[in-house]
Amino acid sequence: MDYSNNYSTTSYGAQGGATGGGFMPGSQSETPSGGKRSYGKDTLRPVTIKQLVDAHHPHPDAEYFMIDGAETTQVTFVGQIRNISTQTTNITYKLDDGTGIIEVKVWIDAETFADPSHPGNEKPKPVEQGYARVWGRLKAFNNKRHVGANIIRPIQDFNEIQYHLLEATAVHLHFTRGPPEALQQAKAGGANGQMGGMQQGNGAYAGSKADASGIRPLPAGASRAARGVYQTIKESPQTHEGLHMSDIATRSGMDVGEVLKGGDELQSLGMIYTTVDDSTWAILDV
């Protein structure tokens, strides 16, 4: 699967004609050159809300965001609706997917909204505390982020929640570690521990224990806090749920603030992941 140019693995069931959420390269006409980017380069990427919150502009004038170092335009995600607010021109949904909370705005078609017999009003509607899938574009206004949605629809098969998170994880790993083929080649390298050219400098695993377990070494530029957190998780007895940050602080002698800073760095590097809550981490093996 090649996620670098577009994302088209799963059919999400977005129906709505021209307002559908799956925008692929060439699906829209390009705008004249004049500083604005071409919408013909749009892609559709599955994400978590935390990724949307952490996304950044590559430069001050950019109209798009970067996630995992890759340009991101159209996104899709799944979450539970915590609140619905109906305004004159739009409906605002507040969605929570367990990694964060973000507002989703859907603009109202006045003609459709006012006509109960319109076919568009016969479709199932998202409800508070229910789950929904969103297709849209991440936007920022007055330093507050929201998603301008093309479509939002209620989740009817709850398996969709799980496979969405798996797809978002697969794409995240693709951009942070490289394609699966490179990882397979790295494992096949055995004793030399090379990461198929994905790591710069000395890519060998640090010792035979790391070779056997498949745990990657930290990048050379990792901070002291990140190294302390990573080493503590790696060497401490634990269940499959990992270690809570307060436990890491006790075992390592670090203060909680330093542990939290190190944990955030490790998550951004794709070295650890959260388990039972946002403060409990485990090492993400190769």
Image (tube, rainbow, N blue to C red):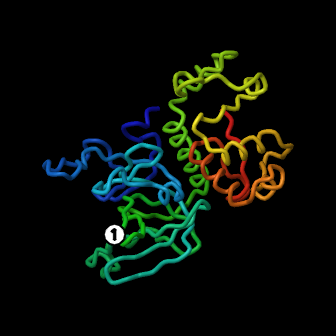
Which residue is at 47% across, 32% downward? 1
Q: Give the residue at x 68% y 16%.
A: 190
Give the residue drawn at x 43%, y 75%.
Answer: 92
Hey, which quadrant is residue 214 in on the image? top right
Q: Secondary structure at mark 1?
A: helix
Q: Residues within 10 Å of mark 1 (few under 14, many from 20)?
A: few
Quarter holding residue 151:
bottom left
Spot occupied by residue 126 in the image (x, y as percentages of width and height): 49, 70
In the rendered image, residue 66, in percent from the top left (x then y), is placed at: 41, 49
Q: Residue at x 73, y 55 (%)?
A: 280
Residue nearer the viewer, 222 or 156: 222
Q: Residue furthest right?
A: 237
Residue under label 1, please give it.
119
Q: Quadrant of the C terminus?
A: top right
Q: Position of residue 159 (x, y in %)?
A: 61, 52
Q: Is 171 left, or right, of 142 in this rendering?
A: right
Question: Residue 212, position in %: x, y?
Answer: 76, 24
Relative side of 118 to 163, left or right:
left
**Residue closer to the observer: 83 or 38:** 38
Q: Nearer the viewer, residue 255 or 8?
A: 255
238 versus 208 height, above or below: below
Above or below residue 148? Residue 71 is above
